[in-house]
Amino acid sequence: MSPELLGAWVAAGLTLAIFSFLYRDNPFFKFGEHLYIGISVGYSLTLLIFNFMIPKWWTPLFREGRMSLLVPTVLGLLIWTRFFPRFSWLSRWAFAFIVGFGAGITIPRMISNFIFRQVESTAVPLVSRGPGGVSFGWEDLSNFLIAFGVLSVLTYFFFSVEHKGPIRPLARAGVLFLMVSFGASFGYTVMARVSLLFGRMYDLVEYSSRGYGYATLILLGIMVAVFSAQALSKRREGE
Amino acid sequence: MRKLADKVLSMDRRVIYLLMAAAALLPFVTGPLGLPSRVSPEVKAVYDRIESLPEGSPFLISMDFDPASKPELYPMAEALVRHAFRKNLRIIGMNLWVTGSGMAEKILSDVAEEYGKEYGKDYVYLGWAPGATNVILGLGQDIYKTYPKDYYGNETSGMSVLEGVRTLKDIPFMVDLAAGDPGIETWVVYGKAKSMAGGCTAVIAPGMYAFLNSGQLVGLIGGMRGAAEYELLLKEMGKATVGMDIQSTTHVLILGLILLSNFAFFSTRRRG
């Protein structure tokens, strides 16, 4: 059996095993699920050790003698003291470094990119000014909708003032904008999930051909036979 | 009528799964449906940006996804790499998702073989390194210190594909293909690339439009639809184009089921 053929049988079998959960929870699904988790962790650990820890930590520190690497090594080891209640306070030094470094790097960049740049792109002119005077085109309408949408949604989430009087319609408009946003997100999510379905269907159809030894059809047949036999034996037990 | 409405409302979910499977298989039986498609401006912007790059320019593609998002992002990555090789750009590939490391390597090596490109001269795959934020910050300071070796263990210094490239600022254009975090947002915040575009799964696409609107991204390829549009621009029918037929059949089914269940719900309610 060629590696490609073996791969096709494994892929078809595992896909069908995972899909079998749609019928009900069963050992095929459990096997596929556990294998997936195990392989993911094994693959990640292997890459971490051989592509990162050995060339970037072990070799420079222990073979080339780069002593500066002792600092992150000690900080990393301190985190493990969490497992020993008597020494767990030592882990705070490592966490203090992580939090301090993380906050210092992240906060200014987050404010700059997520707040200032977004406010800048929201606070745009609502009308166009040209040689012919002031006009209001499609782009201006789009700008207006963005600005109005931001204001109304912020109003909806502003709970310090009761949503009564003139605030009420603005907050209601905010709800409408939120609904449209959720609808668009959900539509995109459906599209994404269908894409995943397509991905597996494409492979299953491909592997059902003669070139792959009818892998999908045979494995599907086996699963259906097992489920039918199980259902039959349960029915007999009930009788 | 009431009986039918009740049956619809209490339909076994497995019937819906079977109907979905049938709708998804339909285009495989009937062949391409040939439905018209249109290229959106945000996808065209990515294409135009790559077209505008002079031959031999370095182009960074970070494939931050894993096999779970393969149907959406794999065709997108293939289309982008094809485009870059067609334009004779020097491709620098990398990834921030450990479980997608091998898949990203396969994309680059497969397409490179198709175009007869040479490793180390026309393209390089830097692979994965832990700590996405630090990796991106490191690339902004020194690529060779962040990636002293590539995915295969070769020294990166002296590689002709990286000639004239020391930091992210030396790369005129980059695309991040992301399935989540770390992804486009991480690159936007920490990357400081000269010019950047994004490609992402449909789930996270709506959230990325804010960066497009603010000019932090020059273009955006969203989900399988975006990938199909890119294939259309390249005039190459790939998996994403085929997948759009399935999108159409399943979406018609979903709409039909929503209408049917609403009709059944309101008809039972009206009769009390």
Image (cartoon, coloured by chain):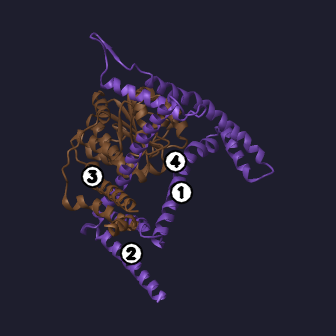
Chain colours: A purple, B brown
For label 3, count other residues whose C-alpha is less than 10 Å away and answer few (under 14), some (14-19) or many (20+): some
- Is residue B248 placed above or below A181 in the rendered structure? below
- Residue A164's spot in the image, x, y percent? 54, 32
The residue where tag 2 is placed is A223
Q: Mark 1 and mark 2, same subunit?
A: yes
Tell me the kind of residue under disc 3: Ser
The residue at 35%/52% (across/down) is A195
Mark 4 or mark 2, which has the lower sequence index? Answer: 4
For label 1, count other residues whose C-alpha is less than 10 Å away and answer few (under 14), some (14-19) or many (20+): some
Q: Mark 3 and mark 4, same subunit?
A: no
- Residue A96's spot in the image, x, y percent? 70, 37
Observer-nearest of A129 and A79: A129
Say how many tags the image has: 4
Question: Given the image, what chain letter belongs to the residue carrying mark 4?
Answer: A
Q: Please tell me whether mark 3 or mark 4 is closer to you in this view.
A: 3
Quarter occupied by the N terminus of chain A:
bottom left
